[in-house]
Amino acid sequence: MLPQESTLLGRQVPQLDYRGVIVQNADAIDRQRSLPHEIQYLAYFHNACDQIRGEAASLQFFSNDQYRNPMVVRIAGLGYQRGFGGHFHNDNSITALRDIPGLVVGCPSRGDDAATMLRTLTALAKVDGRVCALLEPIALYMAKDLHEPGDGAWLTSYPAPGEAMPLGEGRVYLPDDGSSGDDLVVFTYGNGVPMSLRAVREIERRHGWKARVVDLRWLVPLNDAWIVEQARSARRIIVVDEGRRSAGVGEGVLTAIAEGGYGARPFQRVVGVDTYTPLAGAAFLVIPGEDDIVAAADRLATT
C-alpha cells in the first residue's frame, strides 16, 4: 500500500516498539531533523504513548516554539488480517491517538492516498515541526480487488512526485450512475471504505437507495466543516467505525453532524466492541462487517 516513500527519504527508518527508550532516542533524532519512524503495530503505540504525548508532541507548545520535534510515525494497525493476528497485530484502538493535542493522524484506505498523505505529513513535520502519524490498515496492504476476485478495482497508479493530499481533505465515492447519493451517506475510513462500497451495492438492491461513501482520510483533526457539508443533503446517515465504541472516531463524526445542525437525520452507527481483539476467526465477531452495515440500513428502512 505504501510504495517506496520511506526509502525515498534517504535514511534508515528506526522502528519504535514497546521500549520507551527507543522513543526517547527518536526524539533526539528528530531534533537533528531526521523525520521517519515506525511503530510496528498500533498496539505497541500505547507503550510509547507517554513519550509521544508528554515529550515529542508537547515540546513545541511548552517551549513557546523555541524547539520543535518534527516527526512522522508510521503505525501499522487496525484489524481484518486473516491467518495472523490477535490483539497485538489487529489492535483497533484509536482513542489514545485522538487525545494528543497537536498530533496529526491520517489513515489511507488505498495506495495512492497513502503516498500523497505521507508526503503531506512529511511536509507538516519539516515545515511546521509537527508530530504526525500515518495509521496504515495492515489488511489493505495487498488489497487489489474490490467487488469480485480479479476485478483489480482497488489498484491505483502511483501518484506523480509533485502530488500531495491537502490536510483535512476527504474523498467521496458517488453511486455508479453518477448521482449525488443523497438517499444514504456512509461516513467511514480505513478498512471501512472498501467494506462500505461493497455494502451499499446490497443496500441499493434491497431498498433502492442511492448511496455515497465518504472516506474521512484524516482522523485527527477531523474536518468538522466538511463532515457537516456532506451530511447536509443526506436523508439517512450510517457511520462505520472499525475502532471501539467508546471514544472512537465515530463519536467525533456524529458530534460534528449534531453541532452542525443535522442531528435529527436518521442515523445508525456501526462500530467495534469495547474489547481486546481475540485470536483467529473470533476477531471478526468484535469488529464491523459488511453484513452489519447492511443490517444498519435495514433498521433505517423501518424508521
Image (cartoon, grey):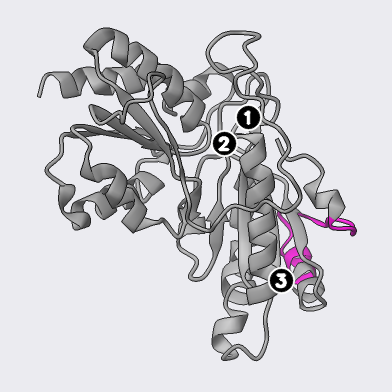
Please state if 152 lies on the left or on the right of 196 as rendered: right
Q: Inspect this view and state whether residue 70 appears.
A: no
Circles 2, 3 touching at the beta carbon (< 8 Å): no
**Along the viewing direction, whichever of 102 and 166 lies nearer the viewer:** 166
Tag 1 residue: 140
Tag 3 residue: 126
**Along the viewing direction, whichever of 239 and 213 lies nearer the viewer:** 213
Please state if 148 lies on the left or on the right of 195 as rendered: right
Amino acid under label 2?
Answer: Ser
- Residue 109's label in the rendered image is 2
Image x and y of residue 253, in percent: 32, 48
Amino acid under label 1?
Answer: Leu
Secondary structure under badge 1?
helix
Residue occupying image coordinates x 29% and y 49%:
229
Secondary structure under badge 2?
loop
Secondary structure under badge 3?
helix
